[in-house]
Image (cartoon, helix red, strand yellow):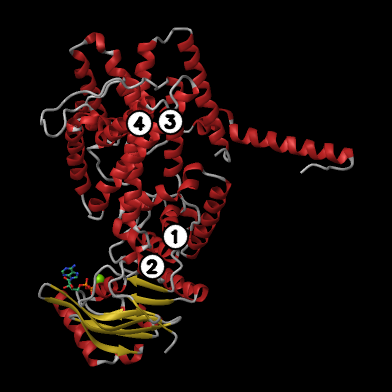
């Protein structure tokens, strides 16, 4: 049990009368990749918002290691090692690609206000160091030749990749990806898969992945948790999930509504 | 500060400009009236550049900047007066210089403290609360100063107000103010080009995303805002010691808007823009003084034209770089680099010829 990095116990939140997430339980172990799936509006993003300190849970607790993190602000969650991407991309649009990554490294800069005003040698050294580090991360997601492009001018797929690089720049232990393949074409999705594998090899981190694309989830996740109407309806290995009758129902139901 | 070629180039450029101004003043080509206008331009530049940090970088509209200026002005004025009364640093030349510097820095610090007081409750909130708070703050400060006995008012008990604070030593010397302006700009520019400036832009772009990468946004916002207030206070101190008299009515809503206009005119996150707008919009109304009634008309037309054809301001977020221009026309950086290398090689060769090198 000691290698559980992130744990949620009976986590829940209501918005007015609506119970968006109810009795949510999760254990994410070191190096593990867990999928979180479910139809639209099931509460997946809300789970992310709870676990990253955006919303305060109305019920239950969550822990990083053995530390209870309830009610900690979002920046404290990052300090504790949790980073995320957003379903609706949230980049610093009018800043360059490398600036986007550098902002996420801000805590790692040692220099303080005085150096910021005077730019001594140590300032340039640190800036250069962190730029180098940022370039490495851009390489991981294949954006190294876009470093000076303004983020808003990147094509959609690359914007998603930049969000991943930016999250990586926080030196997190747990990475939460909210529908990273949404809006990507098949080539980009394949690249994304490679990136995810590369990240796991290189950084040895745990990943919590929200994804709509079932085939993608089945391919890479070790365990999957399925949400529907805010409740966990199934949890297990990809094979177990694929044959779970509640899951099939939930997904078929959703297809009926949409089509 | 000089670890980069461009800062050396800029230093040489501002020194040259300074020498030109010295010659123009000492030969009498620029009389006291002209030098006074240039002094006011310096004050406008500091005001606009400081506003840039809060409005351009942080993205918070500030419409009470004159309030911070007033705090700086009155604080600095009262300090130099008190020093004079106590006969501390009261003399000529260097003594006055230090009295002036101490006073305006103190004015800046008090303005910064008020910046924290105004910013802390409002900057936690998302949205334009700060704009409204600064608007109210600017007016409150003015009214309070109007009624303070020490500031020339008749005291709260009397109720009536509007007296000026007179007899401030006119300690603001253009040469000193010129370098204060250069230093302020250098500091603000360096700050904007550091991790702080980067983070402020990120907060402006997307506060939620900034928090999600671990930025303590409130802390940075308060820091930036109070820093902006500091420089406004500094400018206020200079203003007081240029005029020699302070009337609270000077620091009204219109004054605040004047600086917002300069900021917008120059481009909200460009310090080059602050310099141009601060200078042009201070000098232009004076230059047009002989046209009396048409003066404000021309001023307004100029602004409207800018807003129509360049809504992002003259400079937007672009910064003019002298080094870049030199590179463009003379391949400057590479030439300097080549010369440096050549010198180093010569030195090495010389050393080798001498057999032993004992220097560091
Ligand atoms: N801030 C909020 N206020 C009110 N309702 C919300 C809020 N956030 C999410 N919800 C509701 O919670 C439910 C789950 O939403 P979400 O987590 O975004 O679903 P998913 O990511 O699984 O598609 C939806 O019904 C949504 O409308
Ligand atoms: Mg979602």
Mark 3 or mark 4, which is nearer the start of the sequence? 4
Residue count near mark 2 (Cα–Cα under 10 Å), binned few <14, some 14–19, many ≥20: many
Residue count near mark 3 (Cα–Cα under 10 Å), binned few <14, some 14–19, many ≥20: many
Marked residue chain, label 4: B
- Pick whichever, B170 or B352, lies toward us: B170
Point 30% across, 20% down: residue: B167
Quadrant of ligand 1: it is: bottom left
Q: Are marks 1 and 2 in contact (CB under 8 Å)?
A: yes
Looking at the picture, how far across and down is residue A201, in whole percent? 51, 76
Q: Report the side of A233 relative to A62 (left or right).
A: left
- The residue beneath circle 1 is A107
Quarter the C terminus of chain B occupies? top right
* Callout 1 secondary element: helix
- The residue beneath circle 3 is B101
Separation (CA) of disc 3 from disc 2: 43 Å
Q: How many marks?
A: 4
Separation (CA) of disc 3 from disc 1: 35 Å
Point 44% across, 74% down: residue: A173
User: In this rendering, which labeled residue sits more in front, label 2 or label 4?
Assistant: 4
Looking at the picture, how far across and down is residue A54, in whole percent? 27, 67
Quarter the N terminus of chain B occupies? top right
- Pick whichever, B152 or A230, lies toward us: B152
User: In this rendering, which labeled residue sits more in front, label 3 or label 1?
Assistant: 3
Looking at the picture, how far across and down is residue B149, in whole percent? 20, 30
């Amino acid at each position: 049990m000691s290698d559980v990095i992130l744990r949620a116990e009976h986590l829940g939140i209501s918005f007015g009368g609506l119970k968006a997430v109810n009795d949510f339980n999760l254990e994410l172990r070191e190096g593990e990749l867990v999928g979180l799936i479910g139809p639209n509006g099931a509460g997946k993003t809300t789970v992310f918002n709870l676990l990253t300190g955006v919303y305060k849970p109305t019920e239950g607790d969550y822990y990083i290691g053995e530390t209870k993190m309830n009610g900690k602000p979002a920046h404290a969650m990052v300090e504790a090692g949790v980073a995320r991407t957003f379903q609706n991309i949230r980049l610093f649009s009018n800043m360059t690609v490398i600036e986007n990554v550098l902002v996420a490294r801000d805590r790692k800069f040692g220099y303080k206000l005085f150096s910021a005003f005077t730019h001594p040698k140590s300032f340039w050294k640190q800036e250069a160091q962190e730029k180098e580090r940022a370039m490495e991360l851009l390489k991981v997601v294949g954006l190294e030749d876009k470093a000076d492009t303004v983020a808003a001018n990147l094509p959609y797929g690359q914007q998603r990749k930049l969000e991943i690089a930016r999250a990586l720049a926080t030196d997190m232990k747990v990475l939460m990806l909210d529908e990273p393949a949404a809006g990507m074409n098949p080539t980009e999705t394949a690249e994304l898969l490679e990136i995810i594998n590369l990240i796991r090899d290189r950084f040895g981190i745990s990943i919590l992945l929200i994804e709509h694309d079932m085939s993608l989830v089945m391919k890479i996740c070790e365990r999957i948790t399925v949400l529907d109407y805010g409740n966990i309806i199934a949890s297990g290995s990809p094979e177990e999930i694929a044959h779970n009758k509640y899951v099939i129902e939930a997904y078929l139901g959703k297809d009926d509504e949409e089509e | 500060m000089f670890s980069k070629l461009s800062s050396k180039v800029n230093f040489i450029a501002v020194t040259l400009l300074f020498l030109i101004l010295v010659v123009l003043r000492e030969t009498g080509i620029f009389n006291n009236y002209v030098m006074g206008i240039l002094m006011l331009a310096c004050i406008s530049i500091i005001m606009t550049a400081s506003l840039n940090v809060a409005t351009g970088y942080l993205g918070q509209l500030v419409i009470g900047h004159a309030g911070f200026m007033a705090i700086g002005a009155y604080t600095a004025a009262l300090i130099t007066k008190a020093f004079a009364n106590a006969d501390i640093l009261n003399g000529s030349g260097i003594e006055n210089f230090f009295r002036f510097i101490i006073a305006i820095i103190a004015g800046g610090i008090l303005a910064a403290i008020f910046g924290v007081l105004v910013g802390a409750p409002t900057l936690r909130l998302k949205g334009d609360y700060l704009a409204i708070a600064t608007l109210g703050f600017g007016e409150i400060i003015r009214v309070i100063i109007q009624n303070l006995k020490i500031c020339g008012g008749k005291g709260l008990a009397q109720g009536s107000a509007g007296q000026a604070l007179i007899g401030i030593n006119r300690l603001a010397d253009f040469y000193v103010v010129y370098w204060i302006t250069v230093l302020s700009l250098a500091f603000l520019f360096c700050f904007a080009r550091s991790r702080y400036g980067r983070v402020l832009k990120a907060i402006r772009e997307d506060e939620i995303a900034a928090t999600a990468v671990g930025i303590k946004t409130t802390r940075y916002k308060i820091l930036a805002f109070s820093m902006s207030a500091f420089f406004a206070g500094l400018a206020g101190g200079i203003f007081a010691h240029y005029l020699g008299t302070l009337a609270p009515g000077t620091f009204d809503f219109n004054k605040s808007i004047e600086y917002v206009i300069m900021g917008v005119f120059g481009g909200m996150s460009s310090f080059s823009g602050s310099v141009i707008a601060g200078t042009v919009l201070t000098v232009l109304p004076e230059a047009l003084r002989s046209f009396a009634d048409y003066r404000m008309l021309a001023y307004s037309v100029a602004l409207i034209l800018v807003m129509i054809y360049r809504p992002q301001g003259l400079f937007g977020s672009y910064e003019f770089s002298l080094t870049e221009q030199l590179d463009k026309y003379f391949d400057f950086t590479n030439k300097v680099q080549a010369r440096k290398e050549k010198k180093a090689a010569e030195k090495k060769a010389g050393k080798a010829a001498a057999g032993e090198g004992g220097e560091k």
